[in-house]
Image (spheres, rainbow, N blue to C red):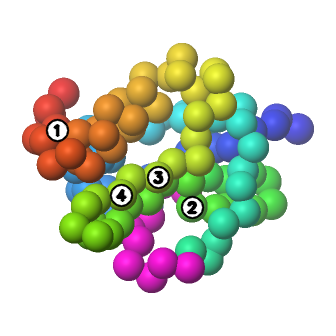
Amino acid sequence: EELGVDVTLVNENKSHPIVSNLKFENWHSNGSLYKVGPLVDKRATVLLNGGTKNITEPIAWTRSTYFKGRVFYTSLGYPQDFEQRPFRQLLENGILWALQVPIPAN
């Protein structure tokens, strides 16, 4: 059995600027899957899910306004995740989005 998490896009949010330019072919993280669902914040927008053989959980989400700011969260970040281009692009996009800076199309 392979350990880690398969990363998938939440289809109804695929046009969100943070994920619209990411490539999702066989995206796998060797990290653990945190059990966080259902999210307490009903205004959060889930962008990515992580799945194992037995469970799927949100692993990246946003909140458009929180005390007049934007919030981006991901539970990804296992050391080997940084070797994967989609993860690095996710971080860059999330930071730019939170700063309200346009995200390049790539």
From this view, report whether residue 66 is shown above or below residue 41.
Answer: above
User: What secondary structure is marked by label 2?
Assistant: strand
C-beta proximity under 8 Å, tags 3 and 2: no
Residue ID for mark 4: 71
User: What secondary structure is marked by label 1?
Assistant: loop
Q: Which dot marks residue 73? A: 3
Q: Determine the image quadrant of residue 46.
A: bottom left
Q: How many marks?
A: 4
The alpha-carbon separation of the residues under discs 1 and 4 comes to 16 Å
Identify the amino acid type marked 3: Tyr
Identify the amino acid type marked 1: Ile
Q: Which dot marks residue 58? A: 2
- Whether residue 8 appears in magenta in the rendering, the answer is no
**Which quadrant of the rendered structure holds the C terminus?**
top left
Residue ID for mark 1: 103
Earlier in the chain: of badge 1 and badge 4, it is 4
Q: Is residue 37 left or right of residue 104?
A: right
Q: Is residue 59 left or right of residue 2?
A: left
Q: Which dot marks residue 75? A: none
